[in-house]
Amino acid sequence: MKHPVVGTIALLAILAGGAYIGWQFKDRRVEGVRNTSGPAARAALQASLGLELPRSAYDPSCFEEDLEKTKLVFAGFDIPAIELPDLLSQLHDSNLTLPGFQELTSDNTLFESMKLQSSKVDPRHVWWKLEELKNPRCASRTGRRNSNQLVWRVQVCAGETSASNYRVYLAFSEEPAEAAAK
């Protein structure tokens, strides 16, 4: 080869061009995953859903995930049975997204749908164990906010863990209306 320097420069130019194209067309998804329990989960529930758990609620867990413009929140906590109606009704009356206690029914289709989001599907949800609930009651609600720009859906499932306690699971999603229409 008479001009090895020219060949080396040409090869470097091709590699630089490939790197430039790769940089320009890289996947720019913004993803954020937060998995919390205890006091951090209480704070996450309040920040993400506006849900302030009473002091009597215990063993809270929260999993938050941001996929591009879609927000997902999965949560679970235990609460004394006597306080659950007041908690859900209070939130329902304050125009938050949770269904009221009176809307919880024995909806097996919704229960099975929520069960599919278990730790068997996603190991980050190790505490998501709806199959352990006795007499589960579920409800869901969808709506729009921010001048109909965002579509949200919340699913709630509550079931007895003992005679005096309930375990509550929440699955919340929110995405731009144009993405939901596709």
Image: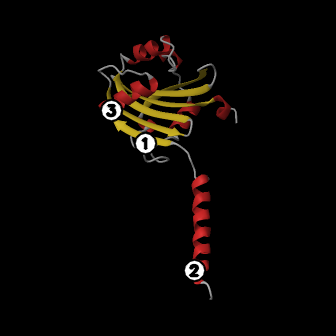
- Which badge, 2 or 3, is on the more N-terminal residue? 2
Which residue carries the number 2 mark? 5
Report the residue at 30% width, 33% height from top. Answer: 38
Q: Is residue 21 above or below residue 84?
A: below
- Which badge, 2 or 1, is on the more N-terminal residue? 2
> Is label 2 or label 1 in front?
2
Q: Amino acid at mark 1?
A: His
Q: Position of residue 96 (x, y in %)?
A: 50, 17
> Is label 1 or label 3 in front?
3
Q: Secondary structure at mark 2?
A: helix
Residue 182 falls left or right of residue 33: right
Work out how far the residue at label 2 is from the one at label 3, CA to CA, in angstroms.
Answer: 60 Å
Q: How dense is the environment of label 1, judged by Cα within 10 Å: few (below 14), some, or many (20 and up)?
A: some
Q: Amino acid at mark 3?
A: Ala
> Is label 2 or label 3 in front?
2
Q: How dense is the environment of label 2, judged by Cα within 10 Å: few (below 14), some, or many (20 and up)?
A: few
Q: How dense is the environment of label 3, judged by Cα within 10 Å: few (below 14), some, or many (20 and up)?
A: some
Report the residue at 57% width, 77% height from top. Answer: 8
Q: Position of residue 62 (x, y in %)?
A: 40, 34
Report the residue at 43% width, 48% height from top. Answer: 123
Q: Position of residue 173 (x, y in %)?
A: 54, 32
Work out how far the residue at label 2 is from the one at label 1, CA to CA, in angstroms.
Answer: 56 Å
- Which badge, 1 or 3, is on the more N-terminal residue? 3
Which residue carries the number 1 mark? 125
Q: Is residue 179 visible?
A: yes
Quadrant location, the C terminus: top right
Residue 153 appears in which quarter of the rendering?
top right
Residue 100 falls left or right of residue 126: right
Which residue carries the number 3 mark? 40
Whether label 2 touches label 3, CB < 8 Å: no
Q: Is residue 69 above or below residue 97?
A: below
